Structure formats: C-alpha cells, structure tokens
Amino acid sequence: MPSSSSLNQLSEEDQNFLNTLVEKGGPEPHEYSEFAAIVNNLEDQELEYFRNVIRESLDENTLIGHGFVKPFGYPGDFTIIHNIYKVHVNPDNKYGNWDRFFQNQAGAQAVRNRKDYFLKRCAEIDNVSGEAKHVLILGSGPATDVNEYLQNNPHSKIKFDLVDFDQNAIDFAKKQNEPFKDSIKYFKINVLRYKPYQWYDLIWSAGLFDYFKDKHFVYMVNKYYKYLSDGGEFIIGNFSNSNPTRRLMEVLSDWYLVHRSKNDLVRMALEAEAAEELVEVEMEELGVNLFLRIKAAS
Ligand SMILES: C[S@@+](CC[C@H](N)C(=O)[O-])C[C@H]1O[C@@H](n2cnc3c(N)ncnc32)[C@H](O)[C@@H]1O
C-alpha cells in the first residue's frame, strides 16, 4: 500500500477518475486526453503511488501491464512487439479499454509504420535484378515483419539472417516462419558479438539501438557497416526525442528508451567513420520513429 505521505500526491478527483478506469478496464476515447494529462504531469517521485492506484491493470492481461511486468526480463520483448503489429486487444472487458488506448498511441502506430517502412525497403531490394539478395536483421524479435513480407512475396529472392539473444524470441520467430524456413537463418547471440560471414544488401535494425548508449551505438555502426555489399544500406530505427508517447511508456510500462534527434543520429554515424555524403535520416509519417540510413562506401 502507498505510504500516507504519498497519499497527497494525487488529487482526490484524479484518484477517483483512475479508480473508475481500473473498474472499466481502461479509459474510453473521450477520457484519453484527461488520462494522458495526469500521466504526463506526474513527477518521478509520484510514480510508485500512481502505479499502486492502477496496479490491478498492470499485469500481463494488458499491453501496458505486460510492458510493466516484463515476463522475459526486458522491455520491448517479442510478444509485445508482435501484439503491436497485430493491433491485439484483450477481448475481456476487464482489460480491453487499456489495450485500445495503448494501440491508439502515436508510439504504437510508429512501430507499425516502421514495419511498413521495412517492407518497402525489402520490396526495393527484390526489384533489383540479380541472384539471391541478403538481409541481416539485428535484434529480430518475433520476425513478424519478415513473416508479413514473405507471405506477401512468396517468390522473394531475399535470404534473411536474423540475430537475437533471446531464445524465446528465436523460437517464436521460427515457429511462425516455419513455411519460410528455406529463406531464413537464425543466430542466437548478442549483436555486439555476432560476426557476419557475408555481405548484405540491407542491414536492418529497429527497436534495438534505442536501448544502446551512444558509445555502443557508434561501436555497432562501425562494426556492421563494413558488411554492406555494393549499393547496400545499413538502416537503424530510433525513437525521436519528439515522441509524444514517451512519458506514457515510462510511467505505465516502466519502458525507458534513449530518444534521439536527427542531429544525434548523424553525429554518431560520422563518429563511426561513415562518410557524410553516405548518411541521411528519414522518418515515418508521424515523425516518431527516425531511420538513420548509411549507404555502402564504394
Ligand atoms: C523491441 S524488439 C524489436 C524486434 C524487431 N526488430 C521488430 O522491430 O519487430 C528488440 C529485440 O532485440 C533483442 N535484443 C536486445 N538486445 C540485444 C542484443 N544485445 N543482442 C541481440 N538481441 C538483442 C531482444 O531480445 C528483442 O527480441
């Protein structure tokens, strides 16, 4: 239970409002802005009390609760990413509103948009004439993005190498991609230690570098971009520091990312010895997910 001193940290009105949300399984659309305003205004020292008020909703039955509980020991695991892609909502009324709220956030939409961005890059690669093409994915998670691509492009000539250090993620990815097993190889290893054995037309990583400190980010760019084939690209997704869902992720799911600006991404690419003319930054349509693109040196 919260201590009596922390009882003063939310107004009675806010507490009553939060209690009704818990009772009805989360906010309804007309309550989103009121709920978001409470969350966005919370100070760090108020988090424990706030989370106690909504504790019943912070379990694995909700997406925000899954984020909070971290059943695989880290935030952003393969199940939550898969559920964001599939716009999953718990059919149980006791929880469904929370999931609808979560899926409605710009951060969740940006994750779906980054998948679409990846699908477009793969289609471009497939359109280039020639033999088999090679794509390396760092921190591949559920590989739902690869699944969607291969379902929609059964004659793709892309061979995917997927690297992830979580055996559960690899197992999940393998199972759902069983029909495409001839096109995918799996490597269960930390990306910091993986040694590429060939050159790639695309090295893709989303939902990974925004957990790295700058020095690891730079190390990873420098380590991998040498493995691009002629005309190849290294593309890294990173949440932008204008992510409007940042505080909601931190407060509701204890999910902290290193948010970065375009300039941060370019600066780190240059620190990693990429040539300036080969570096650019794009974004998905909401501007919440940035993509650092580094072209192969010729
Ligand atoms: C947020 S998920 C993103 C999954 C996928 N890239 C996507 O966007 O759909 C991050 C994945 O990276 C993996 N991961 C995190 N740190 C890693 C590391 N140092 N080496 C290998 N995998 C890592 C996690 O196990 C998780 O599956």
Image (spheres, rainbow, N blue to C red):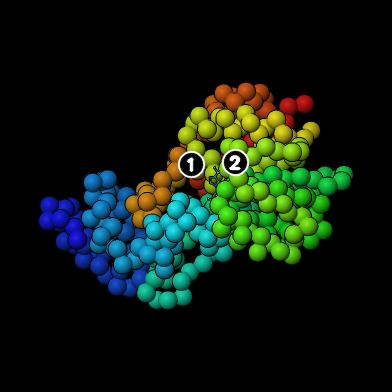
Does any atom of ligand 1 lie closer than 8 Å to the CB of label 1? yes
Give coordinates of residue 77: x percent, y percent: 51, 54
Question: Could you tell me which secondary element the residue under label 1 belongs to?
Answer: helix
Q: Residue furthest bottom?
A: 92
Residue on which disc 2 sits: 191
Q: In which quarter of the image is the C terminus?
A: top right
Q: Residue 170 in the image: state x and y as whole percent.
A: 61, 56
In the image shown, does 290 or 216 lie closer to the viewer? 216
Q: Which of marks 1 and 2 is nearer the N terminus?
A: 2
Q: Is residue 204 above or below residue 104?
A: above
Residue beneath the point at 29% across and 63% down: 54
Amino acid carrying mark 1 in the image: Tyr
Q: Decide which of 37, 203 is in the foreground and name it.
A: 203
Q: Toward which corner of the image does residue 34 lie, by quadrant?
A: bottom left
Q: Distance between the residues labelled 1 and 2?
A: 13 Å
Please rate how many residues cluster around mark 2, counting C-alpha atoms within 10 Å: few if below 14, some from 14 to 19, many from 20: some
Q: In the drawing, what numbered circle is on residue 211?
A: 1
How many numbered discs, if any? 2
Left-right relation of 197 to 114: right
Q: Residue at x 22, y 60 (%)?
A: 14
Q: What element carries label 2?
A: loop
Q: What residue type is labelled 2?
A: Val
Does the rendering let one see residue 113? no
| Residue 262 higher or lower than 190, as above or below | above
Residue 30 falls in image quadrant:
bottom left
Residue 102 image label: none
Question: Which residue is pictured at 12% across the width and 52% down the height?
Answer: 5
Report x, y in % for residue 23. Answer: 29, 73
Mark 1 against mark 2, which lies toward the viewer? 2
Q: In which quarter of the image is the N terminus?
A: bottom left
Residue 265 lies, in percent from the top left, at: 54, 32
